[in-house]
Image (cartoon, rainbow, N blue to C red):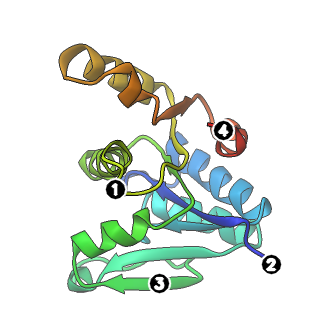
Amino acid sequence: MEHAGRITVFGSSRAAPDDAVYLDARRLGRLLAEAGYAVCSGGYAGVMEAVSLGAAEGGGTAIGVTVASWAARVRPNPWLTSEIATADLFDRLARLIASDAYVAMPGGPGTLGEVALTWNLFQTHSIPVRPLILVGPEWRRGLAQLAENFRITPSDLAFLRTVDSVDEVLPAIRAPR
């Protein structure tokens, strides 16, 4: 299958297969694969596993960007088409960000760090601005709190797009800026 591009999905490693966010991420992976995108994630459990499984179910490619030094304590998920083993977390982040668009599911500190880094790289003109889609009402509430309590302007927020469900992700990726 010819790829329409590569989409990186950020999200919690702690999402269990019966969690709503896992099920949504699985659907997202399938939708992205069916649209011709290669799906990239951190390659481990939770949301990363779910989008990889969904991509496999959609007949697509699932790329996992892992950390070699973590191999003794954590294994890549079984749904990966390919694994990119990086030397450290910083190299992993750089490779995750080397995509055509980004989708963030609800997550924890790792997900927040990935979103914040990508967002800041846009803001500082360090990488080209690409779609950064945040899925779920948690993101809207969190961004409102950030804007209220930190030095975040409307122009900063313009780099982000929030949607309520994974069904809105593809139209958001394809929408003009």
Give residue 43's position: percent from left, percent from top.
Answer: 44, 71
Q: Earlier in the sequence, mark 3 or mark 4?
A: 3
Which label sits on residue 172?
Answer: 4
The amino acid pointed to by label 1 is Ser
The reply to whether the C-beta atoms of the residues labelled 1 and 3 are less than 8 Å apart is no
Q: Earlier in the sequence, mark 2 or mark 1?
A: 2
The amino acid pointed to by label 3 is Glu
Q: CA distance from mark 1 to mark 4?
A: 23 Å
Can residue 42 be seen in the rendering of this structure? no
Give residue 151's position: percent from left, percent from top.
Answer: 20, 23
Q: Earlier in the sequence, mark 4 or mark 2?
A: 2
Residue furthest front in the image: 125
Q: Regarding mark 4 in the picture, which secondary structure is present there?
A: helix
Q: Earlier in the sequence, mark 1 or mark 3?
A: 3
Q: CA distance from mark 4 to mark 2?
A: 23 Å
**Is residue 175 toward the left or the right of residue 13 in the image?**
right
Mark 3 crowd level (few <14, some 14–19, many ≥20, 10 Å Cα): some
Quadrant of residue 112 within the rendered picture: top left
Closer to us: mark 1 or mark 4?
1
Residue receiving disc 3: 83
Q: Regarding mark 3 in the picture, which secondary structure is present there?
A: strand
The amino acid pointed to by label 4 is Ala
Closer to us: mark 1 or mark 3?
1
Residue receiving disc 1: 126
Q: Residue at x 36, y 85 (%)?
A: 85
